């Protein structure tokens, strides 16, 4: 018998918390709040599948960020039987994916609202 929906949701919440401790070394905002996590799935057996992107294709630190995400989940989410982080490029990342927490962190860091500026520049 597999995990219940409630158990899977609890694992998913722990995965989110683990990912909030993983940072893109070039941007001091965690990968979750930066909007790099496109999907988190926990199956009935406790396998965790993450769909993740990066801010730009060809990122030289891609392997490091993926390994950090896998490591953080394995360390902090003991219920996860297996962890898979899949790098995806579609749809391309834009600042619109940044969470409200990430947006505030970027405002403090940059001194302006990156999302607002991106919208102006692309309108």
Image (spheres, helix red, strand yellow):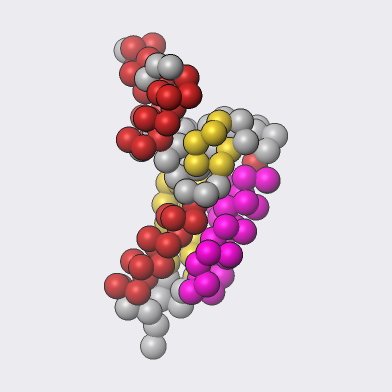
Residue furthest to the front in view is 108
- Choose top left, top right, bottom left or bottom right for residue 122: top left
**Which stretch did the figure color magenta?**
64-87
Residue at point 58% right, 38% down?
24
Number of callouts in the render? 0
**In magenta segment, residue 123:** no
Q: Is residue 107 visible?
A: yes
Side (left or right) of 64 relative to 74 = right
Quadrant occupied by the C terminus: top left
Q: Which of 88 and 18 lies nearest the eye of the viewer?
A: 18
Residue at point 49% right, 56% down?
18
Say above or below: 100 vs 44.
above
Say above or below: 121 vs 54.
above
Say above or below: 83 vs 28.
below
Quadrant occupied by the N terminus: bottom left
Say above or below: 41 vs 29.
below
Q: Is residue 41 visible?
A: no
Residue at point 52% right, 49% down?
21
């Amino acid at each position: 018998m597999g995990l219940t929906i409630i158990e899977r949701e609890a694992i998913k919440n722990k995965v989110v918390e683990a990912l909030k401790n993983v940072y893109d070394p070039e941007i001091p905002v965690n990968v979750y709040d930066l909007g790099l996590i496109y999907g988190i799935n926990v199956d009935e057996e406790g396998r965790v599948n993450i769909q993740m992107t990066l801010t730009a294709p060809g990122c030289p630190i891609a392997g490091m960020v993926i390994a950090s995400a896998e490591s953080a989940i394995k360390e902090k989410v003991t219920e996860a039987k297996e962890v898979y982080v899949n790098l995806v490029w579609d749809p391309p990342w834009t600042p619109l994916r940044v969470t409200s927490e990430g947006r505030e962190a970027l405002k403090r860091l940059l001194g302006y609202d990156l999302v607002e500026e991106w919208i102006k520049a692309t309108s």
